[in-house]
Amino acid sequence: MSRRCELTGKGPMTGNNVSHANNKTKRRFLPNLNDVTLQSETLGRGVKLRISAAALRSVDHRGGLDAFLAKAKDEDLSANALKVKKEIAKAQASA
């Protein structure tokens, strides 16, 4: 399982551990990923995603999963999230 947010594309970053003696060693900053089930009003079901805590706050701020995916760029989304976005768009078009 990759350490990448399915909605924002946020992944690991690199940097240095810096000791008191100013010695530098490489380290990784990992994103705060959580397995969540977000409800889609259009589809009427839950969608399981692995997203960062910041993305979860963004989803709430934009008014839910449907609104977030409508504004999200396709290159940032994972294959699973992109599939859900297309399902939502298709369901909204037919309704």
Image (spheres, grey):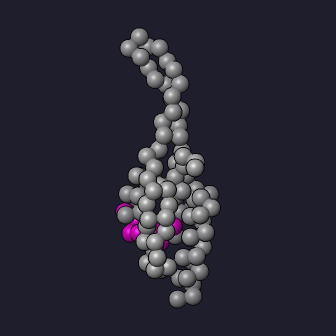
Residue 16 % position (x, y): 49, 25
Q: Is residue 79 magenta?
A: no
Q: Nearer the viewer, residue 20 or 72?
A: 20
Which residue is drawn at the image coordinates 51% and 28% (left, top)? 27
Q: What secondary structure characterizes most of the magenta part? A: helix
19 to 15, vertically: above or below = above
Residue 76 % position (x, y): 58, 56
> In the rendered image, is residue 95 in sight?
yes
23 to 77, vertically: above or below = above
> In the rendered image, is residue 67 in sight?
no
Q: Is residue 64 magenta?
A: yes
Q: Nearer the viewer, residue 34 or 11?
A: 34
The segment highlighted magenta reads 61-69
Which residue is drawn at the image coordinates 49% and 68% (left, top)? 47
Residue 4 % position (x, y): 54, 49
How many labels, in total? 0
Most distant residue in the front direction: 1
Most distant residue in the top direction: 21
Residue 56 % position (x, y): 41, 58
Which residue is drawn at the image coordinates 60% and 73% (left, top)? 86
92 to 53, vertically: above or below = below
Which residue is drawn at the image coordinates 48% and 40% (left, top)? 30
